[in-house]
Structures are given as structure tokens and as C-alpha cells.
């Protein structure tokens, strides 16, 4: 399966994130706490329908928000 784009809304530390992936290689880098692991977790959630870090879906929702939205194409 190939993932061309990812859209997140209110997922963990992301208010919104809209990514388009390159067809060959994609590298995520940044300082601590910027959301690299949360991005990988979002990809996992799209593939498996649940998180590998928590069994409580409520913990995936950005603090003080009511819901989240994930979309992959």
C-alpha cells in the first residue's frame, strides 16, 4: 500500500497537519517534542485502527479539543 498524503486535525500535539509524501523516501526530523513520534503514531492508527501507545482513544485528542480527524490517501 502506498500513502500519498496525510491530514491530521486535533491529533496529539497537532492542531492541523497536511502532508504530501514523496514517492520514494520521506524523512522526519526535528527537535524533541515537535511531534515526530506522534506523526508515526498517526500513520499506525490509520493502518491498524488503534494506537500502539495507548488503549484510550481520548488520549489521542489534542488537549482541550473535543474530537480528532485522520485522513490518508
Image (cartoon, rainbow, N blue to C red):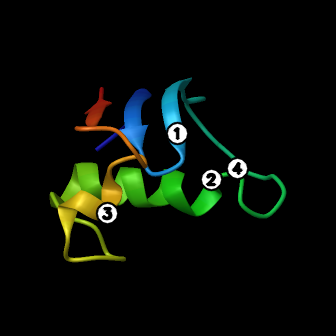
The mark nearer the N terminus, 3 or 1, is 1
The CA distance from mark 2 to mark 3 is: 15 Å
The mark nearer the N terminus, 2 or 4, is 4
At label 3, counting other C-alpha atoms closer than 10 Å, the crowd grade (few under 14, some 14-19, many 20 or more) is few
Indicate the quadrant containing the N terminus: top left, top right, bottom left or bottom right.
top left
The CA distance from mark 3 to mark 1 is: 13 Å
Asked if residue 55 is positioned above or below residue 66 in the image, the reply reads below
The mark nearer the N terminus, 1 or 4, is 1
As helix, strand or loop, the secondary structure at mark 3 comes to helix
Q: How many marks?
A: 4
Asked if residue 37 is positioned above or below residue 43 in the image, the reply reads below
Asked if residue 33 is positioned above or below residue 56 in the image, the reply reads above
Residue 17 in the image, given as x and y percentages of width and height: 52, 28
Q: Kindly indicate whether the residue at mark 2 contacts the one at mark 1 (C-beta within 8 angstroms).
A: yes
* Residue at the spot of label 4: 28
Q: Residue at x 71, y 60 (%)?
A: 33
The mark nearer the N terminus, 4 or 3, is 4
Q: Residue at x 33, y 56 (%)?
A: 60
The CA distance from mark 4 to mark 3 is: 23 Å
Front tag of 2 and 3: 3
As helix, strand or loop, the secondary structure at mark 1 comes to strand
Residue 6 in the image, given as x and y percentages of width and height: 41, 31
The CA distance from mark 1 to mark 2 is: 8 Å
* Residue at the spot of label 3: 59
As helix, strand or loop, the secondary structure at mark 4 comes to loop
* Residue at the spot of label 1: 14
Front tag of 4 and 3: 3
As helix, strand or loop, the secondary structure at mark 2 comes to loop
The mark nearer the N terminus, 1 or 2, is 1
Residue 73 in the image, given as x and y percentages of width and height: 30, 26
* Residue at the spot of label 2: 35
Amino acid at each position: 500500500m502506498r500513502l500519498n498524503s496525510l491530514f491530521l486535525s486535533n491529533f496529539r500535539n497537532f492542531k492541523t497537519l497536511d502532508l504530501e509524501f514523496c514517492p520514494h523516501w520521506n524523512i522526519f526530523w526535528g527537535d524533541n517534542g515537535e511531534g515526530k513520534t506522534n506523526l508515526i503514531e498517526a500513520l499506525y492508527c490509520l493502518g491498524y485502527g488503534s494506537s500502539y501507545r495507548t488503549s484510550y482513544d481520548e488520549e489521542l485528542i489534542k488537549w482541550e479539543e473535543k474530537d480528532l480527524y485522520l485522513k490518508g490517501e
